[in-house]
């Protein structure tokens, strides 16, 4: 009897041991990278473009989840930053420390990117920023584990100034020194950074800066700002804002009779044409926006031939999620393209060349990135400033383009090499804001 | 000297008038909250979120169901009045005898529930009513009709609420109930009914604000964040329950924002307004029009 019981016990133990062994070996065989994805899915920034960036990133992550990468399964864990920097930090730390993700990806707002990057670097974890643009994220920080293929804020500000500088004489019939420009911006990291680029660009071009001012994106009233703009009489307004502050400003500008020759937007709220159109109606026509080129507008002839089918796939998936959108926002393409660069270029190299997905392998693989112009869906190439440089981790090959909304279509108008049509400048006579 | 004189131009006058019109918006918002927070001493921290629900109601009725604005407005006022009464019945009534902090926390919870409900039900998109009112122009100065309407509504609303509170039995009962909740029942007043009426009235005023704000602002689940804190400050600055004080406080606050923003950075306008509030809390803690004791 005792012998039988002992035999049963031993048999049970053996079964338990072998089961544990099987589980362990299964775990060893199931190679996986867990990616924490952080965007704003609620709060004001969600509708300002963050959710669209999330959709773009998710389409690509879902695509690679089906195939895996170099034998690794892809598992994305999503978190909502709720449009708050503190929540973005807490969620990133939670993903890294509790969910045990191998890296974090995404981030729409520059106000979140700056503190989150510092925290992630402190934890010596890997961070891949798809969307936010503030130069302050990298400037003189010397980060090792933080990378961003996206163009930086000062590039946005410089690009629009360059566009106006090159067109001042031809379109406004004015020398740059006689052109009156106003720079207004939301006062977060994003707006301040772009406005610095604007200021530097204005100085370089020799413009007469008649006004420069920041405001809170949640301010309930901007009429005093509009009155000051009326007093300053700018030919061109350079504006950086989210939404709904953009529609509030432009609505109050219409009501107070503000007139100008051109309005240059810089991404974020200006990148979501549907919302501009809903808030402003026909007045959304002729507005300029600066952003990385929409993947659906990029020149596919000069692009890596494997990318057009991916662009088509992203468009089709997006249309399933958001049917009937007149102009697919650039934010979708930014999220998708910058995620695709990581999944198709950096991650395979980390696994093959550096043996895994730990932060150091990912960092080394990112530093090796050398994609020429035309090698991404956004048209630009990718090569990161290396360690020891002031902007270490920032893509040195990225650039935004200037687009203009005309008749429910967006067309690239600057730089000339990418231009799809001639810009309508200044605002035609008879339009609401025209100073003609 | 010339630089100083240059300030006194047509744009200064425009800023002053815009300040008055912004004051109308803030006074309209403060009206209902003053009734609830100031008169019956119940804290609705979620007041601005009721306005947000009203704005959504307007948006969907006008944009999706094609209901005329003038039909949708009374329906919205009715809807938010019912919400106000429901808020009292479900959340405040069980806590009436509890310390005020409990009401604050409970309605704080309702604030997050309403924000989350709006996010789930309506999404995070900014929605615009799409009604563009004409602009009133005087030479180089232009003013928004939507703001003029808010100003008039606030003025009429204040007079109406003042008359209701001082000339009717229910109004008198509402004022009396804040002084002693227990004794009113002994004097033959149905306190439950009075609280419900007041809450519905407060909700109706939030609904009225929603009908006019939706002409000026996009609606989204977090629109209340832009107005909630300022509305509370105005009620306190004007003196809790003092409708005329609240009205004056709204205009003072708005003028400081408008003129401060004109003479310096816009942000400084808000800084000055909040600094003014803090100073006034030291000088006149019971409100601008409080009687000195």
Image (cartoon, helix red, strand yellow):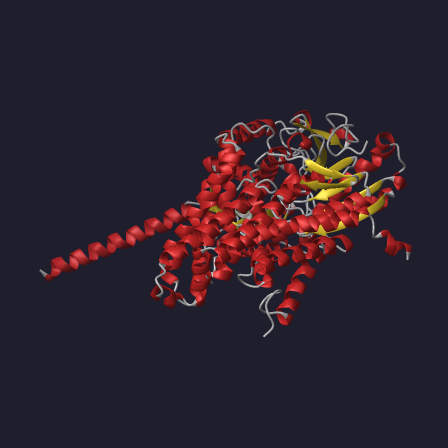
Screen quadrant of the N terminus of chain B: bottom right
Can residue A50 be spotted in the picture? no
Q: Nearer the viewer, residue B102 or B36?
A: B36
**How many discs appear?**
0
In the shown orientation, is residue A178 left or right of residue B31? right
Q: Measured from the top left, where is residue A81 in percent x and y?
A: 53, 50
- Find residue A336 and report its horizontal and vertical position in percent: 57, 37
Quarter of the figure that contains the C terminus of chain B: bottom right
Residue situated in front as seen by the camera: B114 or A386: B114
Kindly identify the residue that appears in the image at 77 percent across and 49 percent down.
B13
In depth, the one of A384 and A177 nearer the eye is: A177
Where residue A13 sits, quadrant-wise, is bottom left
| Residue A149 placement, left or right of A69 | right
Picture coordinates of residue A116, whole percent (x, y) = 59, 55
**A351 vs B81, nearest the viewer:** B81
Classify residue A194 as left or right of residue A110. Answer: right
Residue A300 lies, in percent from the top left, at 65, 26
Task: Name the residue rendered at 67%, 54% in the picture.
Answer: B254
């Amino acid at each position: 009897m005792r012998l039988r019981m002992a035999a049963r016990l031993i048999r049970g133990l053996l079964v338990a041991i072998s089961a544990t062994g099987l589980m362990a070996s299964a775990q060893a065989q199931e190679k996986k990278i867990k990616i924490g994805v952080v965007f704003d899915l609620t709060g004001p920034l969600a509708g300002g473009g963050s959710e669209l960036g999330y959709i773009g990133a998710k389409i690509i992550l879902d695509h690679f989840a089906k195939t895996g990468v170099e034998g690794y399964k892809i598992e994305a864990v999503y978190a909502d930053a709720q449009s708050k920097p503190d929540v973005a930090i807490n969620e990133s730390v939670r993903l890294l420390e509790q969910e045990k993700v191998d890296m974090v990806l995404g981030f729409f707002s520059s106000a979140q990117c700056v503190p989150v990057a510092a925290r992630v670097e402190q934890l010596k974890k890997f961070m891949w920023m798809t969307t936010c643009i503030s130069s302050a994220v990298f400037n003189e920080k010397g980060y090792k584990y933080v990378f961003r293929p996206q163009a930086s804020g000062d590039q946005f500000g410089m690009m629009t100034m360059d566009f106006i500088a090159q067109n001042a004489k031809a379109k406004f019939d004015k020398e740059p020194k006689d052109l009156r420009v106003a720079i207004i911006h939301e006062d977060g990291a994003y707006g301040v950074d772009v406005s610095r680029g604007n200021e530097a660009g204005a100085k370089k071009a020799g413009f007469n800066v008649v006004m420069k001012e920041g405001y809170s994106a949640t301010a309930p009233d901007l009429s005093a700002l509009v009155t000051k703009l009326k007093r300053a009489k700018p030919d061109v307004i350079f504006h950086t804002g989210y939404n709904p502050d953009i529609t509030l400003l432009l609505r109050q500008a219409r009501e107070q009779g503000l007139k100008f020759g051109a309005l240059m937007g810089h991404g974020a709220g200006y990148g979501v044409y549907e919302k501009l159109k809903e808030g402003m109606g026909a007045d959304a026509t002729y507005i300029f926006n600066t952003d990385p080129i929409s993947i659906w507008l990029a020149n596919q002839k000069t692009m890596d031939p494997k990318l057009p089918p991916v662009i088509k796939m992203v468009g089709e998936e997006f249309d399933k999620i958001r049917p009937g959108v007149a102009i697919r926002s650039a934010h979708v393409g930014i999220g998708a393209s910058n995620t695709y660069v990581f999944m198709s270029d950096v991650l395979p190299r980390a696994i093959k060349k550096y043996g895994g997905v730990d932060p150091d392998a990912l960092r080394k693989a990112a530093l090796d990135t050398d994609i020429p112009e035309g090698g991404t869906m956004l048209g630009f190439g990718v090569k990161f400033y290396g360690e020891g440089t002031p902007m270490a981790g920032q893509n040195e090959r990225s650039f935004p383009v200037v687009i203009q909304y005309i008749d429910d279509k967006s067309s690239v108008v600057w730089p000339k090499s990418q231009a799809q049509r001639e810009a309508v400048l200044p605002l035609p006579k008879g339009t609401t804001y025209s100073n003609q | 000297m010339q630089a100083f004189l240059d300030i006194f131009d047509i744009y200064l006058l425009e800023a002053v008038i815009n300040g008055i019109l912004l004051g109308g918006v803030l006074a309209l918002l403060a009206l209902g909250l003053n009734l609830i927070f100031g008169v019956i001493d119940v804290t609705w921290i979620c007041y601005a979120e009721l306005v947000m629900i009203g704005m959504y109601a307007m948006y969907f009725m006008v944009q999706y169901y094609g209901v005329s604005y003038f039909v949708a407005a009374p329906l919205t006022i009715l809807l938010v009045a019912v919400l106000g009464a429901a808020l009292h019945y479900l959340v405040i009534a069980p806590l009436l005898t509890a310390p005020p902090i409990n009401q604050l926390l409970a309605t704080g919870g309702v604030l997050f529930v309403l924000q989350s409900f709006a996010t789930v039900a309506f999404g995070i998109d900014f929605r615009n009513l799409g009604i563009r009112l004409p602009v009133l122009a005087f030479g180089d100065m232009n003013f928004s009709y939507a703001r003029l309407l808010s100003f008039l509504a606030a003025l009429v609303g204040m007079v109406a609420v003042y008359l209701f509170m001082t000339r009717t039995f229910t109004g008198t009962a509402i004022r009396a109930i804040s002084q002693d909740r227990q004794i009113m029942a002994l004097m033959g007043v149905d306190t439950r009914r009075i609280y419900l009426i007041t809450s519905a009235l407060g909700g109706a005023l939030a609904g009225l604000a929603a009908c006019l704000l939706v002409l000026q602002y996009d609606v989204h689940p977090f629109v209340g964040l832009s107005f909630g804190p300022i509305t509370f400050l105005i009620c306190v600055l004007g003196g809790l329950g003092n409708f005329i004080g609240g009205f004056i406080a709204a205009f003072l606050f708005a003028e400081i924002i408008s003129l401060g923003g004109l003479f310096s950075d816009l942000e400084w306008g808000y800084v000055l307004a909040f600094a003014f509030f803090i100073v006034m809390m030291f000088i006149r803690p019971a409100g601008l029009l409080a009687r000195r004791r």
